[in-house]
Amino acid sequence: MTPALTAPGDTVEESAQRSGEGGWGAARAGLVRPWEVHRLTGPASLLHGLSVPRRPRRLLRWCHAASPALVLGAGEPLAHVDRAAAEAARLPVVRRRSGGASVLVGPGRVVWLDVVVPAGDPLWDDDVGVAPLWLGRVWARALGALGVTGAVVHEGRMERAPWSDQVCFAGTAPGEVRVPAGKVVGISQRRTRAGALFQCGALLRWDAGEAVAALCTDRAAAAGALAHAAVGIEDLIGRVARGVLEREVEARV
């Protein structure tokens, strides 16, 4: 299949499948429309170049960043980044299309899923505080199936904490998932007239020091304060195969 995006020296490898009758999609789940599934691997900069298709349909887009990168929210100031520290760590700085604060992506760090819902779909909601709740419940059920206990979907307003303007996993937004040990799934949104893009990050492991290592802040204080703000799935239950987690999520949409 032709890569979704390319740049000199970089590629995005893509595979796709569409759920069909008798599969895990619309027929089995009783949904009005099936889900199309894409699995992509490439640089975070190219993966974040993808957005809501011009003709949106229900889409699950699993994005596997081939190497580490620091990803800023759409409106997050570039001044949050310590350029010298990022360059020393060979950490590219990338901006995503959805809101929120920074996330460190890369192998073994975060399971990244983009979810597209077209406007007018039964899963669409005009209220941005309600729109991601169904998706948070999908993640909570999938984590429960893997053996993660106590997963709760945040259904209230955004809860801010120190450093939440700089680090995604410091605060908790509607639809995001927490367990007693901390936040485990973050969800940010981008909405157009045509549809909504929900960008999900499920932590595999949490290292607060690593999360703030390229930020322009009191890194020692931030790392100490954020040490127990979040927790990774593999911190809780041990190693999880990427494909297993993906299948558990797909089975519940």
Image (cartoon, rainbow, N blue to C red):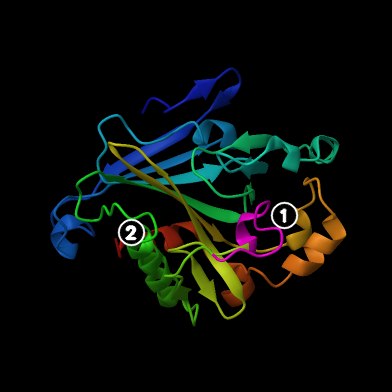
Judge whether residue 238 can be spotted in this image: no
Q: Which residues are magenta?
A: 159-170
Relative horizontal placement of residue 37, taking residue 92 as reference (left or right): left
Question: Which one is in front, 82 or 138?
Answer: 82
34 over 147 or under it: above or below? above
Q: Position of residue 125 (x, y in %)?
A: 28, 54
Q: Position of residue 174 (x, y in %)?
A: 45, 63
Quarter assignment of residue 59: top left
67 magenta-colored: no
Residue at the spot of label 1? 211
**Label 2 SS:** helix
Q: Position of residue 86 (x, y in %)?
A: 79, 39
First in sequence, mark 1 or 2: give its number.
Answer: 1
| Dot in front, 1 or 2 | 1
Q: CA distance from mark 1 to mark 2?
A: 28 Å
Q: Amino acid at mark 2?
A: Glu
168 magenta-colored: yes
Relative horizontal placement of residue 45, taking residue 118 as reference (left or right): right
Residue at the image point whose x is 85% and y is 55% from the top: 218
Quarter assignment of residue 144: bottom left
Relative horizontal placement of residue 53, taking residue 177 as reference (left or right): left
Residue at the image point whose x is 36% and y is 66% from the top: 138
Judge whether residue 216 can be spotted in this image: yes
Question: Which one is in front, 192 or 12?
Answer: 192
Q: Amino acid at mark 1?
A: Ala
Relative horizontal placement of residue 129, taking residue 63 as reference (left or right): left
